[in-house]
Amino acid sequence: MKFVIRLAAAILLAVAAALPASANIVRDGSFELNNGSWKLTDGWFLGDAGRGAQTGVNSLSTGCFGPEFICFAAQALPTTIGQYYDLSFWLYADGLIGPEGFPVGQFDNGIRVMFGDAVATTILNFPTTNTTSDITTGGPSTQIIVRNLLATSASTVLQLSGYHDPSGIFFDDISVDLVVSQIPEPGPLSLIGMGLGCLSLCRWRRARAA
């Protein structure tokens, strides 16, 4: 009976080890540390701009002129070849909202996010959500999610390119997470079945002995 219990415990531990875990692989994705994790070209700013921060006080912004994506912020991420990743970030663009709640100052802007050699997303003329008539006050950000980005290298460069004329477009809380299936694969399911079967056998033997 002790052997059965030990076997069941070992199987359950194997199941726990077989199920993948996910964690954000972006360093300083909230930009609060400002520890040099990001490589910035001219035209990019990391710090407290008074707007564009979804959490904390810092954000990453660009005031580069377009329409070309010639300046960028980048970070090399540790990835697994053949694995898929989900990308998410919060985006805010400067602009002016009139008293009736409609944009009265919509400025040319654009972002392009690269995941390795692949374009993850391109967004042109992202609308402002500023809630005041002051361009430097800011407003709520919008979460952008891009799913199932394939890693083809053990090190994948996440590159953010953008422009905004005449002011800024802001990023915050950038996350890249390994895609985790919500349904265990057949291997873990079989292990779970074996573990439950062993536990049931153990209970049956105890009841019979009594």
Image: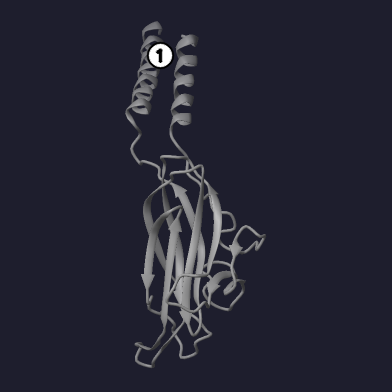
Left or right of 168 in this view: 86: left
Q: Is residue 73 above or below residue 149?
A: below
Task: Name the one closer to the observer, 191 or 83.
Answer: 83
Q: Is residue 51 visible?
A: yes
Q: Quadrant of the C terminus?
A: top left
Q: In the displayed image of the protein, which residue is found farthest to the top?
A: 209
Q: Is residue 61 above or below residue 181?
A: below
Q: In the displayed image of the protein, which residue is found farthest to the bottom?
A: 99
Name the quadrant containing residue 33.
Answer: bottom right
Residue beneath disc 1: 202
Residue 5: % across, % down? 47, 15
Residue 109: % across, % down? 42, 77
Left or right of 32 in this view: 77: left
| SS type, badge 1 | helix
Few, some or many C-alpha atoms within 10 Å of disc 1 (few <14, some 14-19, many ≥20)?
some
Q: Is residue 139 visible?
A: no
Rendered residue at 44%/62% (across/down): 113
Left or right of 57 in this view: 127: left
Rendered residue at 53%/71% (across/down): 53
- Counting every numbered tag in the picture gives 1
Callout 1, which amino acid?
Answer: Cys
Residue 155: % across, % down? 53, 46
Name the quadrant containing residue 144.
Answer: bottom left
Residue 121: % across, % down? 38, 62
Rendered residue at 46%/25% (across/down): 14
Task: Name the one closer to the observer, 161 or 1.
Answer: 161
Rendered image coloring scheme: one colour
Rendered residue at 34%/23% (across/down): 190
Task: Name the one closer to the observer, 96 or 203.
Answer: 96
